[in-house]
Each structure stands twice: as C-alpha cells, then as structure tokens.
Amino acid sequence: MPRYCFVSQVRPDKLDEYRRRHAEVWPELLAALHDAGWRHYSIFVGDDGLLVGYAEVDDLDAAQAAMQATDVNRRWQDEMAQLFTHGARPDENWRYLDEAFNLDDQLAAVPREEDR
C-alpha cells in the first residue's frame, strides 16, 4: 500500500488547542477517514508547531476526494484552519515529502542467508 508523509505548521500559540482537539476527534470524522481508505494515519507535532503526518492509502486522490465530499470534513477543516500559520484549510495545504528510505522494503530486497 502506498505511504504518504506530509508537513504543515501549527501556530505555536495554538498548540495546546490543536493537541486537545486531536485527543478527541469527532467519531463521525474518524468513521469518514476509515471509510475513505485512510490507514495507519498518524500525526506528530513538535513544540515549535511543526506537524508531520503519515498515512497509507491505496489511492491518495480518491481518498482525499472522498473526504472532501463529506460535511464532517468541511466542518473539521474550517475549525482547524485558525490553528495553522497559513490560516487555510489544513487538508489543502499539506506539503508532501518523498520517501527516501523504508526499512521493511530494503530488508525484503536483501537475500536471506537460507536463500543463498
């Protein structure tokens, strides 16, 4: 399954609010993410507001479109926008990073001793 990593920037003065809201994500939003195909979705945030997200999805464009089509995502993104430095919907301002290393992929490519 394809893996995606993205970064964004939470306003440092809004970090407590960001963390509080993400400790209690709306059940309806959790269900929408699951139904749209998001898997192993995690968000990490530093004390300076640097946000790093990770998710696995079969088709990123389709998963994003599915979320865009939900009212719960619109409401969540509108509420979250005020917490970001860019002031816009967070899901429309992610900067994606290229994967440069994956341990599991590289281990799978190494011949095992018993296979030699």
Image (cartoon, rainbow, N blue to C red):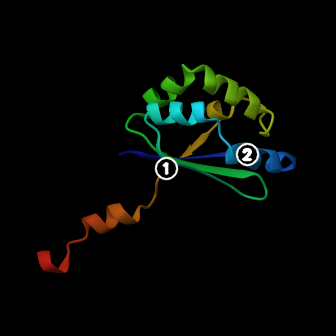
Please tell me which residue is depicted at 72% across the width and 58% down the height of the picture: 46
Q: Residue at x 50, y 24 (%)?
A: 65
Mark 2 lies on residue:
9
Q: Is residue 98 visible?
A: yes
Please provide percent x and percent y for residue 36. 46, 31
Rendered location of residue 31, percent (x, y): 52, 33
Q: Which residue in the structure is indicated by mark 1?
A: 98
Q: Amino acid at mark 1?
A: Asp
Which of the 4 image quarters holds residue 105?
bottom left
Q: Residue at x 58, y 30 (%)?
A: 28
In what element is the residue under mark 2?
strand
35 vs 4: above or below: above
Task: Give the class, few, some or many, for how many residues have Cα within 10 Å of label 2's Cα (few <14, many ≥20).
Answer: some
Q: Residues within 10 Å of mark 1 (few under 14, many from 20)?
A: few
Considering every residue shown, the one lying at the far right of the view is 13
Depth order, front residue of 70/116 = 70
Residue 92 screen position, x and y as percent: 63, 30
- Which of labels 1 and 2 is toward the front? 2
